[in-house]
Image (tube, grey):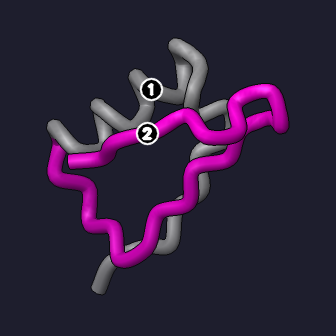
Amino acid sequence: MGYRVAVAGATGNVGREMLNILAERTFPVDEITALASRRSLGTEVSFG
């Protein structure tokens, strides 16, 4: 069973690092939501 995770500020340095850490440590995620400001609209974020 995995977790539902939201990462606030996902397009910033800290948010990207958080996504990287979750992926590197194979954190059990069923669903992940990347949150960012309107200014970042259209910016792609990768996970895993």
In the rendered view, tell whether residue 40 sits above or below residue 23.
Answer: above
In the drawing, what numbered circle is on residue 45? Answer: 2
The boundaries of the magenta stretch are 25-48
Q: Left of 36 or right of it: where is 4? A: left
Q: Where residue 37 appears, x then y in whole percent?
A: 80, 35
Give the residue displayed 16% in from the left and 37% down from the top.
24
Q: Secondary structure at mark 1?
A: helix
Q: Amino acid at mark 1?
A: Arg
Q: Is disc 1 surrounded by few (<14), some (14 to 19) or many (20+) residues within 10 Å?
A: some
- Of mark 2 and mark 1, the one earlier in the sequence is 1
Quarter-wise, where is residue 40 in the image?
top right
Q: Left of 44 or right of it: where is 33? A: right
Give the residue displayed 40% in from the left and 22% down from the top.
17
The residue under label 1 is 16
Residue reaching furthest to the bottom? 1
Mark in the foreground, 2 or 1:
2
Q: Magenta segment: does it hold 37?
A: yes
Q: Magenta segment: does it hold 27?
A: yes
Q: Left of 19 or right of it: where is 9? A: right
In the rendered view, tell whether residue 46 sits above or below residue 6.
Answer: above
Q: Amino acid at mark 2?
A: Val
